Image: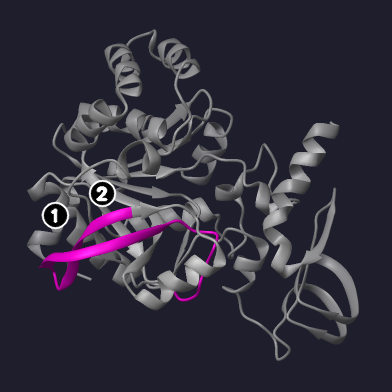
Amino acid sequence: MIESKDTQDLLSWTYAVVMAGGKGKRFWPESRPECPKPLLKILGEESMLQLTVRRISQIVPKKNILVVTNQTYSSRIREHLPEIPDENIISEPEGRDTAACIGLAALYVRRIDPEGVMLVTPADHFIRNQRRFAHVVRAAAEIARQQDRLVTIGIPPTRPETGYGYIHRGEQTEQRRGEKVHFVKKFVEKPNRQLAQQYLAQGDYLWNSGIFLWKVSTILKMLKSHMPRLAQGLVQIERALGTERESQIIADVYRGLESTSIDYGVMEKADGVVVLAGDFGWSDVGSWAALSELLPRDENGNVIQALHLGIDTQGCFIRCPGRLVATIGVKDLVIVETDEALLICPKHRTQEVKKAVEMLEKQT
């Protein structure tokens, strides 16, 4: 497809920051400390990270894609993304949540383009309609560049979900590329079911996707205003970038940083934040049950990735490659096996897999 001139211009000043940290505990037993969720191939032949980078490369050139990860994973990230320049893989010495991650990435972007626009996205989300995604991102990027605003993309809710944060959408401020742009009234933490049902019925709440756009100068200014301690640490790091002491200074500074999300640290406190609705088939793929909703099912509603003999088996997710699995009279189960472990649980309790992992960690 031939890009229009304005799209070509957009690509040149946009830098994608892909956050690829975390431990992915909800995808145990496949996810391990050495293999977090972004590196899992749970949606096909490519890892979640590879799918994300391929999607983003339709919007920005690969040389403008930066990946922030824990230094433990940096070599494996390079194996998954040989097309991304080595210097674009940014290693954190330890996890300090998304505010520190984004602040560190902003310093690297500022060295390239002090007024560049940052697209910030997690590495492990699923987006079905990639053309729609690209269109909404381009509209959001234009606003970020021209209006010096923090911009986020919210997802129109399809159910009363208690596992996501929400964005309360206010009055419309404009249209951009045909997309409605609204002020954000407030960001809301994960609600109970009653509140989630209320948000769904009201129609002016969106799921918080964790996808943001802003100029690098804007986010660094906001970090200075709302998270001064982090901003002071970033000043120390920036002085060391490109020197022999870069890695050591980053490690020293990170030890003293607070662990805070960008939502809590900046987005909930900033004025004039705007949101666009992203109706592009989004999922954060936050559990085995969520994954099963994205994959083809058989006539009984089962997702089967195994040799399977099923009698009266309905709505199950079975992932035991190369194994024969026989099930009789079961419904809505998740069964996942690796060489080292076997998980069996009801679909509606897959969020609790994280608890099981934490119990295992205490025992080892």
The answer to whether 298 appears left or right of 45 in the picture is right
Q: Which residue is mark 1?
A: 143
Residue 263 pos. (x, y %): 38, 44
Residue 113 pos. (x, y %): 17, 33
Judge whether 177 appears above or below 77 on screen: below
Tell me if residue 278 can be seen: yes
Q: Is residue 165 magenta?
A: yes
How is colour applied across the structure in the image?
Answer: one colour
> Relative to the observer, which residue lies in front, 128 or 61?
128
Q: Which residue is mark 2?
A: 213
> Relative to the observer, which residue lies in front, 187 or 345?
187
Point 88% across, 72% down: residue? 325
Q: Which residues are magenta?
A: 158-186
Asked which quadrant contains residue 63, the reply is top left
The answer to whether 49 appears left or right of 329 in the picture is left
Q: Name the outermost residue toward the bottom.
A: 299
Judge whether 290 appears above or below 20 on screen: below
Are dots 2 and 1 in contact, CB under 8 Å? yes
The answer to whether 179 appears left or right of 212 in the picture is left
Quadrant of the rendering where the C terminus is positioned: top right
Residue 50 pos. (x, y %): 48, 53
Point 12% across, 44% down: residue? 148
Q: Is residue 171 magenta?
A: yes
* Disc 1 packing (10 Å; few <14; some 14–19; many ≥20): many
- Residue type for callout 1: Ile
What is the C-alpha distance between the residues marked 2 and 1? 9 Å
Quadrant of the rendering where the N terminus is positioned: bottom left
Residue 256 pos. (x, y %): 47, 16
* Disc 2 packing (10 Å; few <14; some 14–19; many ≥20): many
Q: Secondary structure at mark 1?
A: helix
**Mark before the other along the chain sequence, 2 or 1:** 1
